[in-house]
Amino acid sequence: MIVMDDTSCMVNVARFFIEFCMTESCGKCIPCRAGTAQMHTLLTRICAGHGTMDDLDLLVELCATVKETSLCGLGQTAPNPVLSTLKYFKHEYIDHIVHKRCPAGVCNMEAPVAAESPVEVLA
Amino acid sequence: MSTSVDVKTLLIDGQEVSARSGQTILEVAKENDIYIPTLCHLDGLSDVGACRLCVVEIKGNNKLFPACVTSVFEGMEVTTVTERLQKHRLTILEMLFAERNHICSVCVANGHCELQTLGQEQGLTHVRLPYRNPELPVDASHERFTLDHNRCIMCTRCVRVCAEIEGAHVWDVMGRGIDSMIISDLHEEWGKSSCTRCGKCVQVCPTGALFDKSKIGSDHPKYPDFLPNLNLMREAQ
């Protein structure tokens, strides 16, 4: 158990733990190597306000596969922070995805929705 | 000393089979024509249990076990196809396809790729995960072969065949996690490494990561079946 107050964003906390697992993964088995990296990408996306509800479903599926098929304890426990935060603080994920708002004020939602450069039409 | 063989009886997908003590589930399944999808496993090489595609369920245990490295025991009840297993296998394949660059239509191994075959077999219709497309180098310094890191799935078959069969141990793994890469010698160019030019790694590579330069843009079938025969011949000597 970890004690935190309302100034900690649960999505950001999950992302922090997954980032740790991603860098600590040895890379031998696929679920841990690629799975933690994919989860990190999805969580970063949600933190930046670009996430969708489909991303959340995908995240849950990734958690299950990484947890059940990883070779060692690192991969088998890597999805736990995501699963716990999803279990107790799902509303924070929804806030990030649907309302583009970080309840703790940690995530920077100022980022533009699509980082595409404006199309220039040259006649 | 007793020469009797310790025989184990077990059930695989409801089929009663017998096995010798110390055999793996995968070996027994193969002997009995029961198919279990594999990727990092290759007959004739040691098993590492890295790809996790061969995971099976064993009755009485909620965990999943990789068939290639799990030994049989008396009264074991193995299930190789369930909805849960298929889902995990598909997700693992999706992760592999999204990890580097696996665009089959422009790959030298198109039509002869084990990853592609597995995707078709397991019914992978689309990849939902974001493609990572990392920028990885292509090592074409060798006079006969090329290593394209973008197609590599880190099955380490090349590492094992070079160390165990050829005895040269040119290949190894560098770094860790998502950044790990196959390297020759101590991260030297393949052409300048201690490679013996035997070409075994190219034949065992399941994808288009290792390929013969003379086959670029054409059909590039691989023949990893030589390994069990080679091992048999060596044992006979």
Image: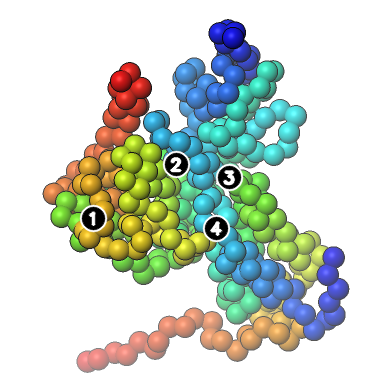
- Of marks 2 and 3, the one in the foreground: 2
* Circle 4 residue: A26
Chain that bears disc 4: A
Residue at mark 3 to residue at mark 1: CA–CA distance: 32 Å
> Is tag 2's residue or tag 1's residue first in the polypeptide sequence?
2
Q: What residue type is labelled 2?
A: Cys
* Circle 1 residue: B146
SS class, disc 1: strand
Q: Which amino acid does label 4 sit on?
A: Cys
Chain that bears disc 1: B
Q: Image point 43% across, 60% down: which residue?
A: B174
At label 3, counting other C-alpha atoms closer than 10 Å, the crowd grade (few under 14, some 14-19, many 20 or more) is many
SS class, disc 3: helix
Q: Image point 85% across, 80% down: which residue?
A: A5
Q: For this view, does B228 lie left or right of residue B197?
A: right
Q: Do labels 1 and 4 share a chain?
A: no
Q: For this view, does A63 lie left or right of residue B233?
A: right
Q: Quadrant of residue A40?
A: bottom right
Closer to the camera, B230 or B121?
B230
> Is tag 2's residue or tag 3's residue first in the polypeptide sequence?
2
* Circle 3 residue: B88
Q: Do labels 3 and 4 share a chain?
A: no
Q: Are marks 2 and 1 on the same chain?
A: yes
Residue B119: give its label: none
Q: Do labels 3 and 1 share a chain?
A: yes
Q: What residue type is labelled 3?
A: His
Above or below for B2 versus B191: above
Above or below for A47 versus B155: below
Q: Image point 22% across, 60% down: which residue?
A: B192
Residue at mark 1 to residue at mark 4: CA–CA distance: 26 Å
Quarter containing the C terminus of chain A: bottom left
Residue B40: give its label: 2
